[in-house]
Amino acid sequence: MSDLPDVFDPRRYAAGPPHDDYRELRDRHPVAWQEEYEVLGWPAGPGFWAVTRHADVVRVLKDPGAYSSALGATQIRDPDPDDLPFIRRMMLNQDPAGAGGGGQDHGRLRRLVSRAFTPRRTDRFAQAVRTRARTLLGAARDGAEGGVLDLVTEVTDDYALLNLADLLGVPRSDRGLLLEWTERVIGYQDPDEPPVLGPDGRPVNPRSPAMLREMFAYAHDLAAHKRREPADDVMTALAHGGLGDPELEMFFFLLTVAGNDTVRSAAPGGFLALAEDPDAQRLLRTGGAGVESAVEELLRWHPPVLTFRRTAVRDTELAGQRIRAGDKVVVCHASANHDERVFSRPHRLDLARTPNPHVSFGDGPHVCLGAHFARLQLRVLHEEALRLLGPYALAGPPRRLVSNFVNGIKSLPLELSGPRGPRG
C-alpha cells in the first residue's frame, strides 16, 4: 500500500472532501496512484491516478486527444465491458472527432443539445424559478418547529427537481419518477440506498441497460407526446432535433440525472458554507458582496461533482509522472478549487473573490451545458432566502452522501434566528 493519502474510499466523503489530504497530494505528489480496493460491496479495480492541482485538472479536461472520455467512460469504477458500447451513446462518454477513443459524434450531439438548452430558453423560466423558491422557502420557514428546518428535504430537493421538470417539459404527475431515477443512479455507493442485486448477489451497476429500461421507455413516450403537442421546453426541442432513439434515451438520462443533481448538490452546499461562516453570511445580507459573485464562490467551495475519470490514450506524462496508455486518470474538482497556486487563501470563504476560475462545471469540450440554468437557480434561491429568512446557523451536523463522485448532502438542519422577511 502507498504511504500517500487515500482519496478513493467513498466512505471518507461522508465527512466532507478530505481537504488536508488533497493539500498533501498537491504539494507532494500532484498525480498520485490510488488503490481501488473492494468497498461497500463493489469489486476492486486496477487503480487510478488522482490529479489534484488546478493546472493539471484543466490540462486533462482540455486534452481529449490524450485523456479520453470514451475509452473507459467517466466514472472511476470500470463499467462491465458488455455495457461500454451502450454507455458510449451518452455525450458525456464520447470524445470530439479525431480525439481519444475516436469514432464518436460528440460535436454533432453537443450542437443539437446546445440549441435545445440555450440561455434564452432557460431564462424564460426565471419567474417560475423565483416563484418556486419563494413558495418552498416560505413554507419551510412558516412550518419550522422551534425555528428549525431541514433545507434539503423541505426546499432544495424539490426545488432542483421541479425546476428541471419544468425545463424538460415533464408533466406534474410524472415528476416523482425523476427523483426515483436520480437517487438510484447517484446514491449507488451510499449504504442508505440499498443497491439492486443481480443473480450472483452482487450489486448491479445502475447505469447498465437493464436498470435504465424504465427510464428509456418513458423518454420515448414523452418524446412522442412532444411531437404531437409541442411546447417551449427541452424535450420538445430534442424530440424534433433529429436524434436517433438511442441518442434520445441517453440525453434524457443525462439531463434527468446530471441536470437534477447539479443543483440538488450545489444548493445545500452553499447554505452549509454560509451557516458555518456567520461573517460571510452577514456580508451577503448587508450587500458587502453581490449574490452573483457569492454563488461563484459557493460553487468553488462546494462543487456538485467531486471527480471525473478519463483514460490515457497513449503513454504520456503529467506533472512529471509517467502515465501508461490505458491508465485511469481521475481529476479531483474539490482539490483543484482549493489549489493555493491559483486561489489566494483558498480555505477562506471570500464571497467577493475575483477572478474565480473554479472548475465546478468542468472545462474543455465537456464543460457543463446546463451551467447557465444552474447558476440562475442558485442565484434566485439565495436572493429569496435573503428576503424571506433571517440569519441561520447549523442546528445539527449535515448528513452527506457516501460517494466519491457526487458531493451530495442528504440533510441540512438550519436554525433560523432574528427578524424574518415577509411571508411569501
Image: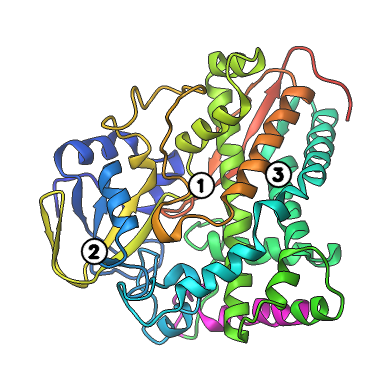
Residue indicated by mark 2: 47
Task: Read off the residue under disc 1.
Answer: 304
Which one is in front in this view, the residue at disc 1 or the one at disc 2?
1
Q: Which residue is drawn at the image coordinates 57% and 59% (left, top)?
A: 258
Q: Main secondary structure of the magenta part?
A: helix
The reply to whether the C-beta atoms of the residues labelled 1 and 2 are less than 8 Å apart is no
Residue at disc 3, secondary structure: helix
Task: Quote the CA–CA distance across marks 3 and 1.
Answer: 17 Å
- Residue type, numbered disc 1: Pro
Mark 2 crowd level (few <14, some 14–19, many ≥20, 10 Å Cα): some
**Residue at image x 51%, y 47%?**
304
**Highlighted magenta segment, given as a residue range:** 200-222
Q: CA distance from mark 1 to mark 2?
A: 24 Å
As drawn, the label of residue 61 is none
Between discs 3 and 1, the one toward the N terminus: 3
Mark 1 or 2, nearer chain start: 2
Using a 10 Å C-alpha cutoff, classify the residue at mark 1 as few (fewer than 14 neighbours), some (14 to 19) or many (20 or more). many
The answer for how far apart the CA atoms under marks 2 and 3 are is 36 Å
The amino acid sitting under disc 2 is Gly
Say whether residue 206 is magenta. Answer: yes
Q: Which image quarter: residue 202?
A: bottom left
The quadrant the N terminus occupies is bottom left
**Snapshot quadrant of residue 324:** bottom left
- The residue indicated by pointer 3 is 153
Q: Position of residue 347 (x, y in %)?
A: 38, 26
Task: Confirm or deny contact between disc 2 and disc 3 (CB under 8 A).
Answer: no
Q: Residue at point 61% right, 85% down?
A: 244
Residue 186 position, x and y percent, is: 54, 60
